[in-house]
Image (cartoon, rainbow, N blue to C red):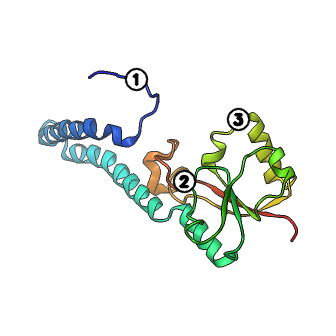
Amino acid sequence: MAVIAQIKFVYARFLFPPIALACVLVGVATAAWLRRKDVAMEVRWGVPCIILLPTICYAMAINAQMLRDSRCAVEAWFVDTVEPSSDVGAFSKPQYLPRLGDLGYPTYTVAMTRDTFERPQPRYLILTSYNYEDFNARQTACMKDLLSGQLGYQPVATFKGQYLGTGSSWLSLAGWGAPVPGKISPTITVLRRAGR
């Protein structure tokens, strides 16, 4: 293996080839474990089940979270609650946002700075957890003021994932404490400009 450049991050898809090879080794080791006669049958079958069951449940939790992504809930909320002529601002690239532009809502990029809020801004703002993970100290302070209503907006709805990253869904027990993989179901806060 040759390292061309260190990128300092790993996507799950980068690990698929070594995981496929590891699965072969795990399968061989599991078969050898199950054939052992010097270990009680309950233990031989119990150990793989204790490992396998949470793993299968976690895979189901990932699928369930992708089927119930918070961005889809935001889109449905906008369709049910907000007039299509209302303009929407966001603090990030559109690929990680609800598809409000596709639904006919005029969308704009907004900077998380105090200067931004000294000028007229869209009627609604969308703030996702992927935004504030990358905010610096000044942006974080501005965000706190925004969420507390000091910059002319009030939070009107919050949408979160139901399975991954909650620490409460037994389906995702194997992933408790681990970061949510990929860009699945961010926490999204919708803010509305105060007044008419």
Badge 2 density bin: few <14, some 14–19, many ≥20, Cα 10 Å? some
Residue 61 location, quadrant = bottom left
Q: Amino acid at mark 1?
A: Ala
Q: Which residue is mark 1?
A: 5
Q: Residue at the spot x=14%, y=36% of the render?
A: 38
Q: Amino acid at mark 2?
A: Tyr
Residue 156 location, quadrant = bottom right
Secondary structure under tag 3 reads loop
For the C terminus, the image quarter is bottom right
Q: Which residue is mark 2?
A: 96
Residue 136: mark: 3
Q: Is residue 158 above or below residue 34?
A: below
Query: Mark 1 or mark 3, which is nearer the start of the sequence?
Result: 1
For the N terminus, the image quarter is top left
Query: Mark 1 or mark 2, which is nearer the start of the sequence?
Result: 1
Give percent across and percent down for residue 24.
Answer: 18, 39
Q: Amino acid at mark 3?
A: Asn
- 46 relative to 132 in the view: left or right: left
